[in-house]
Image: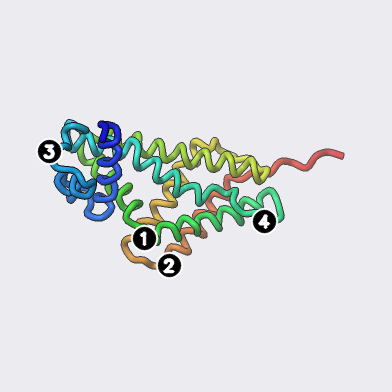
Amino acid sequence: MSVDQRRSALVEAAYRVIADHGVEGATTRRICAHAGMPLASFHYAFESRTALLCAVMDTAVPSDIARMLEAIVPSAVDTGTTGRADMQINMDLQFRAFYALLKTDPGRMQATISLGIYAHNHPELQKVGKQMYERLYGVAALGLRLGGERSGITWSEPVEDLGPVVIAATNAITLIYLSTADDVVVEKIIEAAVREMMSYVVEPAPAAD
């Protein structure tokens, strides 16, 4: 196994272990065991556990959330209409699709939130934790741009400013589900998130005759 392959395997193993046991429970011993590697091989790939956590936040989390956020890019369903109505229908459907994915594997979103909090509380990781969220905002912003182009609407604010709103909504959905598994409350959050996002929708003026 090359160094790059070893690093990739340890990053993925760390992400899975964090999902199952939390950041504090993600010891190098447990991560190596999950990756099927001897503990002695760890330092051939990473100089420290901190370096591994940085790699998880730098690569694994954004890539994984990008895949999940594809579920809420408002472009997947042909509603037979365009404009505001099309965007609203798709936005609602795709937030619900995100929730379905969350329920299938809640640990991965839990890992993302746990890493963000852990990084904030550890100075050596704060910069990487902030960059992780900036990448997530960028993924959401791209989805909004593509969705707007498909539906034929524009946004009243730059999509770069709206990306964090989408991530805030997905985090809220995640936290409520992880804490209570209350579908009724999540339903209210989704409805509120769709209303909030639709408040930024601007339809082009009709063409003059």
Kindly identify the residue that appears in the image at 16 percent across and 46 percent down.
27
Label 1 and label 3: CA atoms lie apart by 40 Å
Which three-letter amino acid code belongs to the residue tagged 2? Asp
Mark nearest the camera among 1 and 3 is 3
| Local crowd size for mark 4, using a 10 Å CA cut-off: few (<14), some (14–19), many (≥20) | few
Image vertical order of residue 174 relative to residue 122, above or below: below
Pointer 2 or 4: first along the chain: 4
Query: In the image, which disc is placed on residue 40?
Result: 3
The percent coordinates of residue 75 (x first, y second) are 60, 48
Pick the front one: 38 or 68: 38
The percent coordinates of residue 2 (x first, y second) are 27, 32
**Label 4–label 3 contact, CB within 8 A:** no
Q: Secondary structure at mark 1?
A: helix
Label 2 and label 3: CA atoms lie apart by 45 Å
Image vertical order of residue 100 relative to residue 9, above or below: below
Q: Quadrant of the C terminus?
A: top right
The residue that mark 2 highlights is 183
Query: In the image, which disc is placed on residue 79?
Result: 4
Pointer 1 or 4: first along the chain: 4
Pointer 4 or 3: first along the chain: 3
Which three-letter amino acid code belongs to the residue tagged 3? Ala
Label 1 and label 2: CA atoms lie apart by 9 Å
Q: Secondary structure at mark 3?
A: helix
The residue that mark 1 highlights is 176
Kindly identify the residue that appears in the image at 39 percent across and 36 percent down.
134
Which three-letter amino acid code belongs to the residue tagged 4? Thr
